[in-house]
Image (spheres, grey):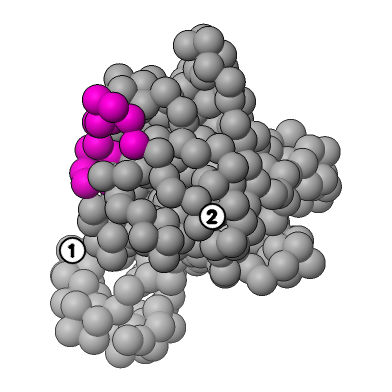
Amino acid sequence: MISSLQLARLCGVSQGTVDRALHTRPGINATTRKKILKMAERHGYKPHPAAQELLGGKRTLVGALAPAQGSIFFMDLMNAIRQVLIRSRFRFYLYPFSDEADFLEAMDDFAARRCAAMVTVPPREELKLTRRQTAYQPIITLLSPCRGAPTHFVAPDETAAGRQAVEYLWHKGHRRILHLTYDRAATAIRDRAEGYCQAMRRQNAAPAVRKVTDDQAIRSAICAYRPSAVFCHNDWLALKTIRALNQTGLRVPDDISVLGVDNSPTFAALCPDISTLQYPMIAVAERCLAIIQGRADTGPVDRFEIVERRTVGRVHPRGVEPPRP
């Protein structure tokens, strides 16, 4: 691939003439334009996107930040956003950050480039951003909001997702529903648990939320509560729960049903049997596009959808209690 200067030299014209030919501007005759376009095609010339932005005054680069470790869910979510944005001719650069310091440094770098927008999964809840980081482009945060300078927080109704999970399991005949989640501060974690508690109380049932860190904690929580169904914060935790149950000789869903959340494409390809709630990735992506294009960002994002597979069953008429380890 050649530069515009090299193309100009090959054609024996100035760079300005090349620019007029490539962008159909006046001030160039048809013969010269045809010659330049033919030479550009022969040598595979493509205008530099950054130079095009400078000349045209339209920014197309969207910077994205997501944790390098933790979950393929973040990568699948960012890929859904990327697919929606590139159809509207935006460029999408994803930077996987390792920690908070790395995140803030990357934010400064993208801010200096004055992108069309930044889409971020913050390393922690309520992280404070500076005016310098948010002055020249909209900042869109996913999963957890940031504070300080104004940003756009895009997320589905996580509280509704918690209620929806209980309603689905209740419809299947489950009355003792345990919610397993993580011991960290995050809007999605807190709101899903709150929705679960609301739905359980609505059914005059006592909610039971347990924060677990490993297989032993999962087994202990199940042994203590003795549920017929476990609602897990996400599909990864659902997978860990199924493995922990299998280690104690319990069968899923014959003895205990397990429901997850997310159904990200990569996870679903690896573990296609887990019943789950579909995270509305495309709806989130379209909301991000609306913000970037300056359209309204208000109104609810689409609800989660139940994906019925093999890990949730109906309660046995007599009820089945798990044996104690």
Please give left or right for residue 73 compared with residue 46 in the image.
right
Percent coordinates x, y for residue 220 in the rendering: 59, 52
Residue bearing mark 1: 30
Percent coordinates x, y for residue 150 in the rendering: 74, 34
Query: What predominant SS class does the magenta segment belong to?
Result: loop
Q: Is residue 301 magenta?
A: no
Question: In this picture, is 122 found above or below 158?
Answer: below
Percent coordinates x, y for residue 51 in the rendering: 50, 66
Question: In this picture, is 167 found above or below 235?
Answer: above
Percent coordinates x, y for residue 214 in the rendering: 59, 62
How dense is the environment of label 2, judged by Cα within 10 Å: few (below 14), some, or many (20 and up)?
A: some
Magenta stretch bounds: 307-320
- Which of the two residues, 281 or 163, is positioned nearer the viewer here? 163
Residue bearing mark 2: 219
Task: Please give the name of the residue rendered at 21% of the width and 44% of the height, measured from the top-left corner.
Answer: 309
Number of numbered discs on residues: 2
Task: Please give the name of the residue rendered at 58% of the width and 20% of the height, measured from the top-left corner.
Answer: 206
Hey, which quadrant is residue 245 in on the image?
Answer: bottom left
Please tell me which of labels 2 and 1 falls first in the chain: 1
Q: CA distance from mark 2 to mark 1?
A: 77 Å
Q: Is residue 171 visible?
A: yes
Question: Considering the numbered disc 1 on the image, is that residue within a helix, a strand or a loop?
Answer: helix
